[in-house]
Amino acid sequence: MKAFFNKLWDIIRLGLHDLGAHKVRSGLTVLGILFGVWSVIAMLAINEGGSYEAQRALRRLGSNNIIVSSVKPPAESGASAQSSGILEYGLQNKDVARLRDTIPGVVRCVVVRRTQRYASEAGRSLAVTVIGTEPAYARIAQTDMVGGRFITGADYLRARPVCVLTASLARRLLVYRDPLGATIWLGSEPFAVVGIIRQLPLALSGGASDVENYVVVPMTADLARFGEMNIMVSAGSETYEKVAVSQCILQMADEQAVIDGATVARSLLERQHPKQDYEVTVPLEIIEQIKQQRRLWNFMFLVIASVSLLVGGIGIMNIMLASVTERTREIGIRRALGAKRRDITVQFLIEAIALTTVGGLLGIFVGMLVPWAVERLLKFTTILVASTLVLPFVMAVVVGLVSGLYPALRAARLDPIEALRHE
Amino acid sequence: MTDTLIHLEKLWKIYPVGPGVAALQGIDLAITQGEYVAIMGPSGSGKSTMLNLLGCLDRPSRGRYWLGGQDVSGMSDDQLSDVRNRRIGFIFQSFNLIPQLTLVANIEVPLFYQGISRRSRHSRSRELAAMVGLGDRLDHRPSELSGGQQQRAAIARALANDPLVLLADEPSGNLDSQTSVEILALFDDLHRRGRTIIIVTHDQGVAAHTHRIVRLRDGQVDSDTLNGGGKAGT
C-alpha cells in the first residue's frame, strides 16, 4: 500500500515536472481553462447579485402582501360612463369586505383611496396625490418616519384633518419652515401636518413613477371633506370619477396563504367585476418569476460555460496528443524499465488534470476578483456562493479527465518495442 | 549444469505479416549465472527479436522461456512489466536516457516503478552514479553529458534494480573507439563481480570481450562457442 502511494505521489510529481518543462505550452492551455471557469463564476455572481437586488426591492413591498388596485377600464368597454358624466369603476367597499372575509389567512386589510389634488401653502401650490387610508398603512408600507408621527386610530375615528407629508414635498411646500405643526390646504380644506415620511414604496404608489409628492390623510377625513367624487381636470375639460377604493392591501399570514389567497381574490373579483377594472399584484409571484428567470439565466450561463470548457478540453486533448507523440520514445523507455500500462495512463492523465486544476484554481481566483471589481466600480451587488465557485471548477477537472483519457490510453497502448525505435 | 538463469526451449517467434515471418525458429539455449555472452549474427538473423524476447518486451509465439526458474513465456503484459522492472537491466545502443530528467532521476526510473521511497532511491542512485564514475554529474541532464557518460549513466540505471541479467544492445555502437574501450572495460569489470551479461552485437571486437558467442542465422542458432574455440552449452 505504501509502495502504491509512493508511486502515485511520484507520478504526480513527474506529471507536474513535465508540465514545468513546457511552460509556454502548459501556460496557454491553462489559460483556456482559466477563462472558461472565470467567466462562469463572474457571470453567475453578477446574475445572483442582480436577482438578489430585485428580490430585496420586492420584499420591501412585502412578500406577504396581496395588493388589489382599481384600474380605469379601457374607454371602449363603455365603462359605465353614465349620463351624469361620472365615470364609476373599481373596487367597492363591499368588495373589500368580501375579500377580507372570504380569503383565509388575512392578517390585516388596509384600504387606500387615492385622489389628485392641489396642496397649497402661503401662495405656493403643488399637484399632489392624496392617500386617504387607515393607520395600519404605516406597517404595511413600511414607511420610515423622518419626523412627527403617522396618522393614528384617533385621527381616523374622529376624521381629524391631519396629514403626513413625504419629506421632499414638505421641503418644497414649506420652504424654510418647520413642517410639523404647519397647516396646508388641500383644495380648500386645511390639514395640520403631523408627520414626515421618507417616501412611498414604488409598488404602493399606484403605478405612478412619482413616489415623492404624497400626502397621507385619514380616509375618514378625506371622505368627510371631499366626498366620494374625484374631479379630474385635464386639458380644459373636467372628468368626474367615482372610485370608492383605489387600493386594498391584504397582508397575509404566510407565503402559502399569499399564493392561495391570490387565487381566491382573482376568482372572486372576476365574478364581481367582469369589466376588469381591477388588478391583483402579488409581490411574491413576481419574486418567484425573478427566481425562475434567474434559474433560466444560470442554466444559459452553464451552457455557455460548458461550451468554453469544451473548447478548453479540446485544447488539452490536442496538447496531450502532441505530448504523447513527442514522448513516444520516453514511453518506450519507461515501459522497458518496468512501467505498466496503468502507470503510463496515470502519468498522462495526471498531466491533463493538473492543467485543468491549475486553470480552475486560477479561474476561481480571477472569478472572485472580477465580481469584487464590478461591485466597486459599477455599484452592482454580486453574490458568490460556494456552488458558484465549486461547480465550474469541478467541471474543469472533469473536462481534464475526459480530454486527457484518450491521449493517455493511446500512450499506454503503445508497443514498447515500437516506441523504443521511435525517433 | 548449475544455476541455469536463462533457459529457452524451442522458442519460436512468428510475426503475423502476410504469410507469417518466422523470425526465430525453435531456439534452444541455456545461459548460466555469471556468464558473459555475445549474441551475433547478420541483420535479419533474428538478433533483435531474440533480444526483445530475452528482455520480456515481447512474448514468444511458441516454446518456453524460463528466467531465473520462472516461466515467463505465458505472462500477461503487467507481469512482464514486473519482470522487466525487477530482473532485467537494459542497456541500449542510443542510451535512451529520458532527456528532461537529471542523471540521478534517470538512474532511479526502475526503482520509481517499484514504489521505493524517494530517499532510498536517491541514495541508491547516487551510489551507482559514483560507481560508474559520474558522482560529480548528478544534476546534469543527458544533453549535458558526453556519449560515454550517457552510456555509463544507462549502465548505472540498468544496475539500479540489481537485475538477474544485463541485456546490452550494441552498447558501444554509438561511441568512438576510445570510449568504447572504456565502456567495454566497465562491462568486463561487472562480469568479474559476478553479473550475467548478454551483449547483442555484430562487432567482433565487442564479442571478443565475452566468454561465449552465440551466432544466429535465419532464426536459428548457427553456432555456440566458448571464446577461445571450445564448445559451449553442453
Image (tube, helix red, strand yellow):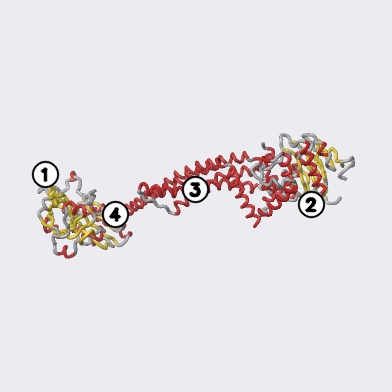
Chain letter for the residue marked with disc 1 in the picture:
A
Q: Report if the CB atoms under discs 2 and 3 are less than 8 Å apart.
A: no
Task: Inspect the image, locate mark 2, and give the three-letter code of the amino acid beneath it.
Answer: Gly
CA gap between label 1 and label 4 equals: 36 Å
Label 4, secondary structure: give it. loop
In the image, taking residue A184 as reference, residue A350 lies left or right, namely: right
Image depth: mark 2 or mark 3 in front: 3
Q: Report if the CB atoms under discs 1 and 4 are less than 8 Å apart.
A: no
Which quarter of the rendering shows the C terminus of chain A?
top right
Between discs 1 and 3, the one toward the N terminus: 1
Which of these two is toward me, A143 or A394? A143
In the image, taking residue B150 as reference, residue A359 lies left or right, namely: left
Label 1, secondary structure: give it. strand
Mark 3 packing: few (<14 Cα in 10 Å), some, or many (20+)? many
CA gap between label 3 and label 4 equals: 43 Å
Return the residue at label 2: B69
Percent position (x, y) of residue A404?
Answer: 57, 44
CA gap between label 2 and label 3 equals: 55 Å
Which of these two is toward me, B176 or B97? B176
- Tell if the residue under mark 1 belongs to the same chain as the one under mark 4: yes
